[in-house]
Image (tube, rainbow, N blue to C red):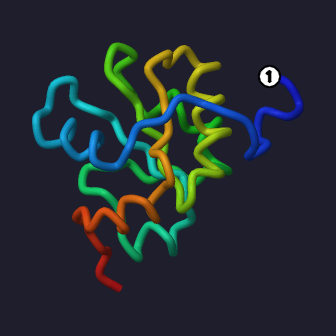
Amino acid sequence: MGFFWWLPFGKVPEISATKLDVMRKEGSPRPQIIDVRTGAEWRSGHIAGAIHVPITELDSRIAGLQLDGTLPVIAICRSAHRSIPAVRLLHRHGFRNACQLQGGMLAWQRAELPVEREEP
């Protein structure tokens, strides 16, 4: 898969927080959201319906996620750095509709969009 796939630099396709929110509400096409942050970050607040898979586990768990290759897959992290290699990995596994949330969860929260929190 190439030695440098995991580097958090470069460009991958992106979607804005507001566009992702509209897609979630309208449901067509229904986005599949993969949150690649740590467990602590996930528990502090995540997008409803997202699947939590830390970036360090994504390669080994991607087949078991049973993602629909015809639907968009949105990778999310805190600030859109870990989601860059996540999108590269998704592309290598055949998910051509994969992109990242532009600006990550920081952008989502700046836009005052809803988050769910895990109870301790």
Q: Residue furthest left?
A: 26
Up-down relation of residue 73 to residue 44 (above or below): above
Residue nearest the viewer, comparing 88 with 40: 88
Residue nearest the viewer, comparing 48 with 79: 79
Residue nearest the viewer, comparing 87 with 52: 87
Mark 1 residue type: Met
Q: Residue furthest right?
A: 3
**Residue for badge 1:** 1
User: Where's residue 15, x and y in %?
Assistant: 41, 37
28 relative to 78 in the view: left or right: left
Look at 63% across and 40% down and name the residue there.
84
User: Where's residue 51, x and y in %?
Assistant: 38, 48
Up-down relation of residue 43 to residue 71 (above or below): below
- Quarter of the image with the N terminus is top right
- Quarter of the image with the C terminus is bottom left
Up-down relation of residue 45 to residue 24 (above or below): below
| Count of labels in the image | 1
Look at 22% across and 64% down and name the residue there.
114
77 relative to 6 in the view: left or right: left
Look at 37% across and 67% down and name the residue there.
110
Q: What is the crowding at mark 1: few (fewer than 14 residues within 10 Å), some, or many (at least 20)? A: few
Residue nearest the viewer, comparing 86 with 103: 103
User: Where's residue 26, x and y in %?
Assistant: 10, 35
User: Where's residue 16, x and y in %?
Assistant: 38, 43
SS class, disc 1? loop
120 relative to 101 in the view: left or right: left
51 relative to 62 in the view: left or right: left
